Image (cartoon, grey):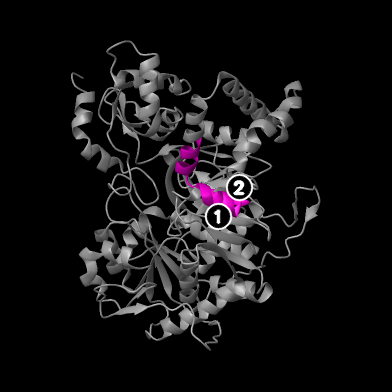
Amino acid sequence: MATTTPLHFSPSDHGVVNHSGELATRSQVLQMTTHTTLDEVFRRRVRLNPDSLAYMQYDDKKQAWQNYTWKETADEVCLWQSMLRSLHLVQGDRVAIMMNNSREWVIFDQAALGLGLVSVPIYTSDRADNIDWILKDAGCKALLIKGQEQWDTLVDIRSRIQTLDALFSFEVLYDAPSNYRLVKKSLPGFAGILANGLTNADDLATIVYTSGTTGRPKGVMLTHRNILFNTEAGLSAVEVREDDLMLSFLPLSHALERTIGYYLPIVAGSSVAFARSIELLGEDLQYVKPTLLISVPRIYERVHARIEETLASSSAVKQRLFSMAVNVGWHHFLHRQHRAGWSPKLLFHPLLDRLVGAKIRSKLGGRLRFAISGGAPLAPPISRFFISLGIEILQGYGLTETSPVISVNRLEDNEPESVGTPLPGIEVCVGENDELLTRSPCIMAGYWNQPQASAEIMTDDGWLHTGDQVEIGPRGHIRITGRIKDILVLSTGEKIGPSEIEQALSSSQLVEQVLVIGEGHPFLTALVVANKSLLNERMNQDAAPGSKAESVLLEALLPTLHEIPGYVHLGGVAIVDEPFTIENGMMTPTMKLKRKKILANYHGMVEVLYEGH
């Protein structure tokens, strides 16, 4: 089955080195055993640091940010457990959460976990018919929403919701169903005790429905042990301190944010601030000044595009200064990583960093120690761009089915073109067709109600098929080269993974989004969401009179493929008129493009691209 020896990295028994060079203690990181549960680590954190900052959240009524301690959070968890007990639910019953990131999300989840219930997260941006499927498939007994806005989006499936034991809301609902219950954050004189001892490590903690690019999503069953093993392994790989502050904006329905942005801070004793929205992210970064960020590549791509767009309209002197800062900054990074020797140009690094790098970092709050990128591949040029400016991005990799992190780069060993090395205790090997297989205590308990699908992805001896094609370097760094199911077979017989080519094309400032096409055709083409302002500017400056936008764009994109094998030929591009978004059904809630949906929607454009061939 496997063609290479499995790689296995053992956890270190040593401490971690802090920025002053001293050995830092991790006394605030909770020590766990194989019997520890998610609700238990929350109770222990409350006992250990009752008055420490746990969460920050913006209060719309007060128009101000509010701080909340672990004790204050625990009091609300107790109140929620009282409300859930009134439903007479039994251990193992499923309850759904459909809310944006917030303390209330965490509180509901902790209340459910403590009672032995299974939480089922639902994306607020998901379609009503998909939500209906999840509620039915999981057999959910209750649903939590914020208020009227979410209730209005569920108008087509209200008959389903009325069959639940309860619909919880933080706002008064118009035309509310009979099972509706208004949530109160506090009750005068209420004093509760957190539920204790109702869960075991191998109990099901959550069912996370994967946002498949085709078909109905599958429910991934994760146990307390799955998630906590992944949390502890992550802390062994990358230091998170008690004084760290995360800004949470990737949806908590996403397994990466759930494990690393919610459960891990409880174990580490760090704090979390909940961003108001992506639109207000810039303002929130300025106020919160986080030390850690977790995001999918799309956010970094947007920031990079805005910086490049601003730079394009700057003076030649500023452009030259910026280019020098990136060049010297990258060499400075390689030197720190012991992958490049000293150079005299490093003498200019402090000045260039002060003039350029520090100003960019200030827009992210100015205190960022590092940022994690996961969920999809981050193009190496974008990663190098930020690292050169002193924003340390650590790209990682994983699946919902692995709770979710399999590998991540380390601060002291960061190869941006890779997704790092496996976390401690996680084995990986390369199987047939260069597919990555993994085995660890993080592997899911299976797909809910789908034993056949579970058997297809997991072997009898515990290996999970990731579906991703990889190369593993001599030092254990994993590089994703494609997807088993995403391979394009050209009419010439060539087999090409589109993801690497899409990454290369996305490195152009002219590209917002791109989908590479070629199945059954003699060459590749691409559907492109273009940066229209930059493309128009290029046409006005460089293009011959009468040139078509597609021709100008294609000519500009061809140099981005210089590192792609020569047999890969991009024969044309079509510019689509709207972005690929969750709202128009072209993107999953985890921001992956729905290839089949996009191809069906733009079938006419694709036919034109291949006319005469």
Most distant residue in the right direction: 22
Mark 1 neighbour density, 10 Å: few (under 14) some (14–19) many (20 or more): many
Place residue 91 in its image quadrant. Answer: bottom left
Where's residue 104, x and y in %?
A: 47, 69
Please report the bounds of the magenta region as a residue range: 282-304
Q: Which of 180 and 87 is in front in this view?
A: 180
Where's residue 383, x and y in %?
A: 55, 36
Main SS of the magenta part reads: helix
Most distant residue in the top direction: 544
Q: What residue type is labelled 1?
A: Leu
Q: Does residue 509 sit above or below 130 in this rendering? A: above
Place residue 170 in its image quadrant. Answer: bottom left
Q: Quadrant of the C terminus?
A: top left
Q: Visible in this render: residue 157?
A: yes
Q: Is residue 134 left or right of residue 262?
A: left
SS type, badge 2: loop
Residue position for label 2: 365
Q: Find out whether residue 38 is within the magenta segment.
A: no
Where's residue 207, x and y in %?
A: 40, 65
Q: Nearer the viewer, residue 542 or 230?
A: 542
Task: State the separation of the CA atoms marked 1 and 2.
Answer: 11 Å
Whether residues under marks 1 and 2 lie with C-beta atoms below 8 angstroms apart, the answer is yes
- The number of numbered badges drawn on the structure is 2
Q: Which mark is residue 247?
A: 1
Q: Does residue 103 sit above or below 599 in this rendering? A: below
- Tell me the mark number nearer the camera, choosing from 1 and 2: 2
